[in-house]
Image (cartoon, rainbow, N blue to C red):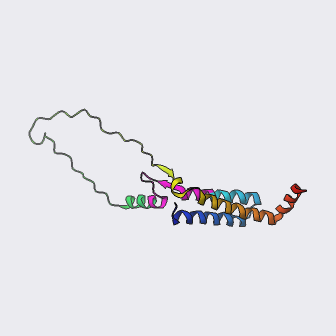
Amino acid sequence: MFNDRDLGILGGGALLAVLCLFLPFPFVGKIVVGFFVLILFMVLALLRLGPDRVPPEIWLKRRIRYGLDVRKYVNQREPSSVHMGAAPQARSSTPAPSASVQFQPLDLAWAEVGVYPLLTAFLAVVAVYFSVWLARGGADQLAIWFK
């Protein structure tokens, strides 16, 4: 199903989205910022990078480790036959491989995480925002509709 990493990221995003209620914005601004934070954390929980589809922190750790590793360069070439006293041979006409652009695969792990934890976090944040709206006078606005 899902692992603790994904659940932790979703829970942290939901908590930060609820804490956006303390921002000094109008209520609509708080909703926009809170849901942006929640969606950002949901994408982070689902995100898989690299050719073997690993979470971003593992992918970043590998990139940093590869970037800091010492490279083993070989500065020697194949011995040419000119220096050995033989006649120069014609080179083969196979073209050298050109530098191709390789894109890093990007995937969202829908099958691994599933939609239920995402919906649970989303509905929990919606319930908290709805409760705050009711406490700030939303009940009076709803009463107008039910008259």
Give the answer, above or below, for where 66 lies relative to 95: below
| Image x and y of residue 133, in percent | 78, 62
| Image x and y of residue 21, in percent | 72, 65
Instruction: Assess whether residue 40 is covered by the magenta stretch.
Output: yes
- Residue 26 showing in the rendered view: no
Total labels drawn: 0
Give the residue furthest to the right: 147
**Looking at the figure, which quarter contains the C terminus?**
bottom right
| Image x and y of residue 7, in percent | 56, 64
Viewer-closest of 79 and 133: 133
- Residue 146 showing in the rendered view: yes
| Image x and y of residue 38, in percent | 63, 59
Residue at 70% across / 56% down in the picture? 32
Residue interval drawn in magenta = 39-59
Residue at 84% across / 63% down in the picture? 137
Q: Quadrant of residue 23?
A: bottom right
Q: Describe residue 89's horizontal placement relative to residue 126 as left or right.
A: left
Residue at 47% across / 54% down in the picture? 49
Give the answer, above or below, for where 91 lies relative to 33: above
Viewer-closest of 102 and 107: 107
Instruction: Assess whether residue 104 is covered by the magenta stretch.
Output: no
Give the answer, above or below, for where 9 lies relative to 107: below
Q: Describe residue 91's horizontal placement relative to residue 22 as left or right.
A: left
Q: Quadrant of residue 15?
A: bottom right
Residue at 35% across / 39% down in the picture? 98
Q: Quadrant of residue 120?
A: bottom right
